[in-house]
Amino acid sequence: MPKLKIDGLEIEVERGTKVIEAAARLGIIIPRFCFHPGLGPVGACRVCAVKFEEGPVKGVQMSCMTDAQDGMVVSTTDEEAADFRKHVIEWLMMNHPHDCPVCDEGGHCLLQDLTVAGGHGIRRYLGKKRTYNDQYLGVFVQHEMNRCIQCWRCRRFYQEFAGYRDLGALQIAHHTYFGRATDGQLESPFSGNIIDICPTGVYTDKPSRFTGRRWDFERGPSLCIHCSLGCHIITSARYREMTRLEARFSESVNGYFICDRGRYGFYYTNHPERPRRARIRTEEVSLDQAIQTAAQKIIQINQKNGPKAIACLGSARSCVENQAMLIRFCRVQGWNEPTYFETPTMAKKVKRAVARLDEQLAVSMREIEKADFILAVGADPVNEAPMLALAMRQAFRNEATIVVIDPRPVFLPFEFEHLPVAPDDLEPCLTALIKGAVHRSAAEKMGEEALRFYDTAPAEYPDAPIKNRMVKITQKLRQSRYPVIICGTSIVRETTPDVAADSALLLRAARGRAGLFYLMSEANTFGAALLSSEEGSVMDVVESIEKGSVKGLMLVESDPFRSFPDYERLKQAVDKLDLFLVMDYLPSFAARLAHLFFPTQTLFEMETSFVNQEGRVQFATSAYRGGIPISQISAGGHPLRVFRRDIPGGESQPAWQILAKLANIISLPGREMFSLSKNELWSWIAKEYPIFANVPIADELPDDVRVHLAQGREKLFPSGGQIRSGGLSRENSTLELVMGDWTFGTEELSTYSKYLQQVEKEPCLFMSPKDASMLGLKDRERITLPLDKGRLEMELRIVDTMAPGVIVMPKHRQLAWQKIEKWPVKVAMGQIRK
Amino acid sequence: MLSEELLEPLQKRIAETDHPRELVVDIMLALQNHHGYLSDQAVEEAARLLDMTPLEIEELATFYDFIYREPVGRFVIHVCDGVVCWMNGYDSVLNHLFKKLGIKPGETTEDGFFTILPTACIGYCDLSPAMLINGRAYGPLTPEKIDGILDRLRSEAPPPRMAR
Ligand code: SF4
Ligand code: SF4
Ligand code: FES
């Protein structure tokens, strides 16, 4: 490893490290505009010049383009180098409009910092400046091209890193223009990152434009909870309002970037209709009063109908603390444990995935970038977990082969092999590929169970063209050094998570190394699966209400009206209840129906933790103390001139604290009392769930910790002999309805964002050309889709990138799709009409 | 819309190429020859033909001096703007052209015959000061020579389709 000296300090770095990075490790930040650690070097701006005094390179050179080598002696403070940098900045500033006072970047602008730091204080150039026309780039990004210094970061991120193709570099030389071919919404769901990386104010955050300088904001580290990946973010809040989100670097999860769903999804926390007061029916009351009333009602029901007469639903968007306290609450009261999953199938799938993920197989998102073969089963990354698509793209840029087995019209921003097969064919296709690439002897060495899995797993592709296509790919997998299996949990069969894990084990045995990466539906699905011991589902609860055995229902940050397949049935069940208690921060449908409502805090208002789909416990600090945004109280004018002790609208509390207070009132004498200390709650968690034992509970933001159940306790290869062969259930007269996610419009929290609502696409039904021609339907026709409990009308899109025998529809906010008796849904072919 | 006549050979060439993108300059030139310049419509057409986005075409179209994104005259005069021509009288060539044609760089004469575009070195240092008109190199240039060339071109060519 090369050893060099920078400003008198010695450092040893891995071969291939650039001098600019070596210096950064010593804490010496060499000026840079074009270099970005997430994008690598390009040498476009010349501002990173340093003096090489001794060693293989001599003189003033670019530190971002020079590999650290043995014997180098580098000076960043050398006079000649400093003078060079000063002039680079001066020429980059030549055409700059000097409009910092009206520029939203001012205060966190790299160009501003370096202009001052570099010593270019006085403008000498008096000529005319080159100017540009700005473009309309859509809802998120404001464009002001005159400020550009041609560092190329935006284009390199947009096209090379992320793989989208509608923003780039136009013109030439000092006319170079960064923008689109024509005005219009940026097409990439990662577009907001150009705001973070542009070193000047060309791209600024449009929704939060002119709301403050960086030092005006309360800023803090937090987490994105708009999908199961849990990307790291930085929050900015001002005037009791969450104002802006930026990406926060994470070595293991998201690297330097986040997606636009994450960046602009947070507006639910400022939602003007967010319920901020406790309510008894429609009457607003104090939180304490509501708790007292709730306690009385609960005691009544418990006395009359017994402890099992009240059911609880939690949710996978709730933090660990809320989920754990709800379970603790139910246990102490002797109630049934809360339910976190819509259907028993979903509960089983997630629990199997959580059970199978162990320390050796689990890979982080950043590790996926290093895979040379990625096999995704039942996963639609851009729509389900956007940043995963970018991790896969980095693997693709390193020449990985990428295969996606999924019935939906999956799009990824790079070339990949798509096997669009029906849900029943997912497992057979996966095992066919694995058996093609792994020799039987590898399974034999792993023991009887492995061999049984190998021998009984079907190896069949649904048709000959796919089979032929897979020959070359199987060959690639056979030679792979680091294959990773990505397995979704939404549209796959109950057994698929196990099949994926068993396949990964075989691959590891054959190739020496392999990874496994599950996708889950929500930010804390993993936490819910770890904590809850019940296999119950919302469906069971509804049945119990119908039977009359459940009289009271408590929802903790859960809105089953969104996700339960049969809206009418759920509504009737809720109408029957003696007590319907809702705790939430969303103006949800359930919240409106509640007999008793309790306002809870959002992630941005509390110290909390979530477990991402990889089993990584991650922590977030509170961004601000909550309350009604001043802009909403004063309607643009001066805030009220009155003194008060409390925060207006600041009654919301963490759901777990409300639960603790409630428990302490209803608990019979002698039962355990709950404390309101988070540390006490965490010690309970650690005691009840030993895998959480080494999770640090510090006041400072602790580091992430991975928690995995398996650790050798889990039976391996349980899916041996269980995998049904595909095609058996294939009938020609019905189409299976697959419901999926879209980047914008389906994820619960982000659908409350007024900015994301503007970029949502209209929901539509996807159908394969084969089925469409059999039905005589045309692209973009409006069609009627009959479901068990009613019909849906929408536009038909015919796409040749999806499986025949299947129709695909998003669980879209704008679609009242909850007319389904039970999954899976098969629709008789002839019934889909114009 | 493009005629079949124009499209077919292009599509054939594209089909025969492993990486159709390699043909992007040829396709842009073919469409430019057809439309007289690379119109917005032509950018869209090129994108469709090559499975690229309009932005990707635009990036290249605006990079190259010989792709015209605006209407040009029948004859496009690329005056060499390279170091050797600078030394050998580039300024006087350019000034003479301005005076004679009554236009500035990037402009087209009223009658639609000539456009002047100074261009980074055209590689005819042996003929410097030099210029390129519709692909043909002229030089070493003097005011008299320029007059002769332009007069001849104007008299021999049919009048432009669209005078501006
Ligand atoms: S727009 Fe910003 S990121 Fe893009 S080249 Fe200009 S200064 Fe760099
Ligand atoms: S990928 Fe998921 S966690 Fe990451 S920023 Fe996007 S929505 Fe948030
Ligand atoms: S940072 Fe090195 S040249 Fe731009």
Image (tube, coloured by chain):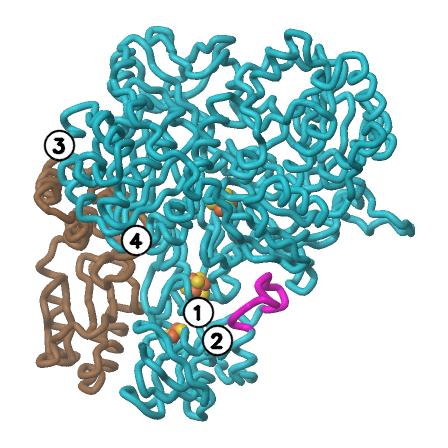
Chain colours: A cyan, B brown
> How far apart are the alpha carbons under marks 1 and 4?
21 Å
The verdict on a common chain for dots 1 and 4 is: no
Rendering quarter of residue B81: bottom left
Q: Is residue A829 left or right of residue B96?
A: right
| Callout 1: chain | A
- Residue labelled with disc 3: A468
Disc 1 or 3, which lies upstream in sequence? Answer: 1
Task: Mark 3 and ligand 2: say if the CB distance to the nearest ligand atom is below 8 Å.
Answer: no
Q: Nearer the viewer, mark 1 or mark 4?
A: 1
Query: Is the same chain shared between marks 2 and 1?
Result: yes
Position in image of residue A663 (x %, y %) = 78, 32
Q: CA distance from mark 2 to mark 3?
A: 58 Å
Kindly report the distance in space between the C-alpha atoms of the residues bearing marks 1 and 3: 50 Å
Task: Quote the CA–CA distance across marks 4 and 3.
Answer: 38 Å
Indicate left or right for A62 with A662 as reference: left
Query: Does mark 1 have its CB less than 8 Å from ligand 1?
Result: yes
Give the SS element for disc 4: helix
Camera-side residue: A133 or A599?
A: A599
Marks 2 and 4, how far apart at CA: 27 Å
Type of amino acid under label 2: Met
Q: Earlier in the sequence, mark 2 or mark 1?
A: 2
State which chain disc 2 sits on: A
